[in-house]
Image (cartoon, rainbow, N blue to C red):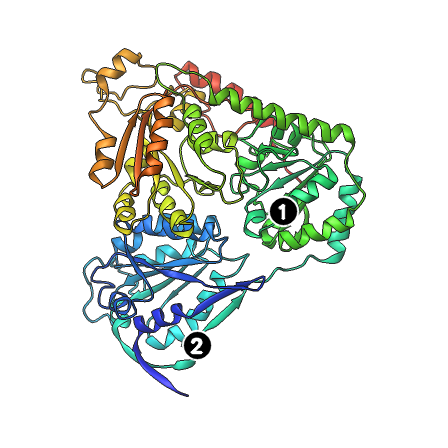
Amino acid sequence: METKRLTTAQAIILFLKNQYVERDGVERPFFAGCFGIFGHGNVAGIGQALQQYPDFRYYQTRNEQAMVHTAAAFAKMHNRLRTFACTTSIGPGATNMVTAAAGATINRLPVLLLPGDIFARRNVAPVLQQLELPWSQDISVNDCFKPISRYWDRINRPEQVITALPEAMRVLVSPSDTGAVTLSLPQDVQAEAFDFPIRLFARRVWHIPRPRPDLALLQRAAEMIRASQRPLIIAGGGVIYSEATKVLSDLTLHTGIPVGETQAGKGSLRYDHPLNLGAIGVTGTFGANRMARDADLVIGIGTRYSDFTTASKTAFQHPNVQFININIAEFDAHKHSGLPVTADARVTLEALMEMLAGWTVAASYRAEAEAFNKAWDAEVERIYNLGNRPLPSQGEVIGAVNTFADERDVIVCAAGSAPGDLHKLWRTRDPKGYHLEYGYSCMGYEVAGGLGVKMAAPDREVYVIVGDGSYLMMSQEIVTSVQEGVKLTIILIDNRGFGSIGALSRSIGSKGFGTRYLFRDEQTGVLPDDELPPSDAVERYLPVDLAKNAESLGAVVFRARTVADVRQALAEAKKQTRTTVIYVETDRYAGVPGYDTWWDVPIAEVSELESVREAYKAYREARKKERYYL
């Protein structure tokens, strides 16, 4: 067999360069390059290999967690058909990726992690940044990746990559099993040479299948739909990943079945589709939640039924409710004792269209859904034009951005109160125009995720909405966006603290304790809560200027005080060629209401605070609606 002498790291990069995927006859390279930060654990291995193969593009980032967020966002924007590799040094560089790796796996987005590791030969141990354990020499901090990786391996000899790399690719390209894949690379092995078979580096095209549903199960699903009186579709991320939005729209128009959208599934239908009820669940609309309450059949398409979607198992109250679960992942298809249709969403909906030909819901039921769609649009318009003073509400800021943005522009967000408001209020007009990381709801995702979205779709404007809390956790990829000429428009909303958790704290009787950015009371030594009078709060604000911070990172910055200022800043931002930040303070207490829903957040059963005791009474009553779906 013909061989080529390469280091382990060179062999890995050469292999990755030649991996392609194909779906529906369209081929594309799977990897767009490699994000990385070099240290002693990878600079002489993967670093040297990337220098040797410049056509496998290397991107210098500022934070290891952020680079994985960027890769995951890029993969999501490409419907999981492309991604990046991410390389780090050993120790803290490696473990900094753990949080984002968990997010990638929870959201089922392919990302390849190449963390450096301690010496395989061990003779110089303990090396700098090595974890020592008295009962084993075969554990490093990289073992932390095991529970959050869909595939994990440690390469202790060069020839192990010959079998490890194809296995890693098998998982990365799997529609059902994808997520973070970790190949832990001891720094000495990275630099060690071996005679690798040249066939390992041949161009390989991985076919992404569209598994078809079992015919008997599909016929049973059609029978259940025909027998139902109040069916409801829940559109999850699988609808978008399988590119099933067109057939979903056709199916709903033909049958009259209304649709509620999860965070990952928002954009499955245009906001003005007559049967789109909008967001469903804890952050849902009144129409979606009321129709969910009374549905006798729930058709979940590409959803994993998170507690936000099911309102902590209180959303579906029909005594005989049944479930049909169309999902590429068998694990999700079996949830809620539903009929498990384990298959690709698009081909399944196409087949259902044929089986349901001539059948529709009752005219009154269709009219009910269409009325909810129109009523919700009126509610959105009300919130967009609230006229809150002296500071604008977050809903008004969202309205200004949504109204200004073009149809194909993308909104990016992840954590805090903004995702809930966006889920309800954003008028989606394109399947890829709404990009929320809400499987993990990871603070710090926003700027890094926006970078990945823009790299995946350079022809679209990308608007990142980030709160002050999340911005303070991870904003440094603004520097990367400037360095790479990847322009973002970032709307930095400042309500001087953790607004989302402040509201949650108030709802459980804890008065927003520990959620505001205020100086500690010098006399009592206690952090102020949300009941501090506004005049006193101003005196205790921390002297932090986030707008100046963004400017120092290389961004163009506009300060906005009113909604009109936001609109003007958006127009100016669109003219810029560099990442632009629009800074605006908002009213901490002017939130978007909840609509006929509930979320299980356990409340202290005993407390010295009367407000907590009262909240617990309400909690105990609400829990009575939680159900097992058997």
Query: Quadrant of the image for the C terminus?
Result: top right
Task: Specify the amino acid type for callout 1.
Answer: Lys
Query: What residue is pinned by disc 2?
Result: 202
Residue 149 % position (x, y):
43, 56
Identified at 66% across, 48% down, the residue is 247
Q: Amino acid at mark 2?
A: Ala
- Relative side of 596 to 109, left or right: right
Identify the residue position indicated by label 1 in the image. Answer: 246
Image-quadrant location for residue 578: top left
Q: Is residue 221 left or right of residue 333?
A: right
Q: Residues within 10 Å of mark 2 (few under 14, many from 20)?
A: few
Return the disc, 2 or 1, that comes first in the chain's sequence: 2
**x%, y% of residue 569?**
33, 29
Neighbor class of circle 1 (other Cα within 10 Å; few <14, some 14-19, many 20+) is: some
Foreground mark, 2 or 1, reads: 1
Can the viewer see residue 515?
no
Label 2, label 1: how many angstroms apart (C-alpha)? 37 Å
Total count of labels: 2
Q: Which of the two residues, 336 or 9, is positioned nearer the viewer here? A: 9
**Residue at the spot x=44%, y=53% of the render?**
75
Query: Of 364 and 166, which appears nearest the observer?
Result: 364
In the rendered image of this protein, does residue 181 appear above or below residue 533? Answer: below
Give how far across and how far down residue 367 sits, in percent. 72, 28
Q: Secondary structure at mark 2?
A: loop
Between residue 305 and residue 276, name the one nearer to us: 276
Cβ–Cβ under 8 Å for marks 2 and 1: no
User: Can residue 98 be seen by looking at this rendering?
Assistant: yes
Which quadrant is the N terminus positioned in?
bottom left
Residue at 53 percent of width and 42 percent of height:
430
Q: Reply above or below: 194 against 248.
A: below
For image coordinates 54% across by 51% down, the residue present is 241
